[in-house]
Every structure is written in C-alpha cells, then in structure tokens.
Image: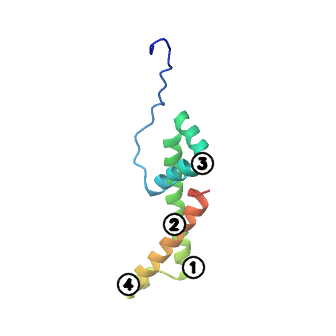
Amino acid sequence: MQGDYLLPNLTLPEQPKVELGQYAQMRRKYLYRQRRILYTNLLTKGKLTEHLAEIEQTALEMEERLLKQMAAQEGVTEKLKEEDPMKWTRLMNNLRHSAQEIVQAELIYA
C-alpha cells in the first residue's frame, strides 16, 4: 500500500549464480543492445542464466572443434611445435582468432 494505491510487489525469479565466460558476456551484451525483447523475456522467465551458460558451453566446444580442424588443414602439428615453437605459436594464435571470429558470427551474434 502506497498512500491510497495498492502497488504490486514484483520480483524476478531466483537464478543460480554462475560464472559467465567471455562468450556468455558477449551474448548478454548483444541481447541487451540488439534483441531487447528476447533479453527481457529470458530475464523475466528466469531463463537468462541458463541460456547464457548453454551458449558459453556450445561456443567453447565449437571453438575447440574448429581449432582442431583448422590446425589439421594447415599442417600445424606437434612436430612443428618441437622444431619451431615460435612459428607454431604464431600459427595457432592466428587459427584461434579465426575460430573465435567464426564462433562470434555464427553463434553469439546470430
């Protein structure tokens, strides 16, 4: 009761505390800025944390799979790592960045 009015006492459902990684935070920002209705629906239903955790797990699995496939295609092997560690590191960093860009385009910002 606020003065002469009855105001509803609205609260959000309890959501589990989960550490959100890089991809989950990127997805949350994207939903908040670009897909506001979906973000609000997930938040009010208590499904936002679950959705973000699922996105994080899927993105990490996808990145790992892409990285292995791309390394095999480019010939980046353990033998190269032993022979020329700097070249191996450079190639793996390039492949990792490429895999991250693909994950962002196909999963995070989709």
Query: Mark 3 or mark 2, which has the lower sequence index?
Result: 3
Query: Mark 3 or mark 4, which has the lower sequence index?
Result: 3
Q: Are marks 3 and 2 in contact (CB under 8 Å)?
A: no
At label 4, which amino acid type do we have? Answer: Met
Q: Which residue is mark 3?
A: 35
Q: Which residue is mark 4?
A: 86
Query: Mark 1 or mark 4, which has the lower sequence index?
Result: 1
Residue at (60% x, 48% y) in the render: 35
Query: Mark 2 or mark 4, which has the lower sequence index?
Result: 4
Of circles 3 and 2, the one toward us is: 3
From the top left corner, tell me how far across and down residue 46 is, in percent: 51, 35
Of residues 103 and 80, the one drawn nearer to the viewer in this rendering: 103
Q: Residue furthest top?
A: 4
Q: Are marks 3 and 4 in contact (CB under 8 Å)?
A: no
From the top left corner, tell me how far across and down residue 10 is, in percent: 49, 25
Residue at (46% x, 80% y) in the render: 91
> How far apart, in angstroms, are the residues tagged by discs 1 and 2?
17 Å
Q: Which residue is mark 1?
A: 73
Mark 4, secondary structure of its residue: helix
Mark 1, secondary structure of its residue: helix
Residue at (50% x, 20% y) in the render: 8
Query: Mark 1 or mark 2, which has the lower sequence index?
Result: 1
At label 3, which amino acid type do we have? Answer: Arg
> How far apart, in angstroms, are the residues tagged by discs 1 and 4?
19 Å
Q: Which residue is mark 2?
A: 100
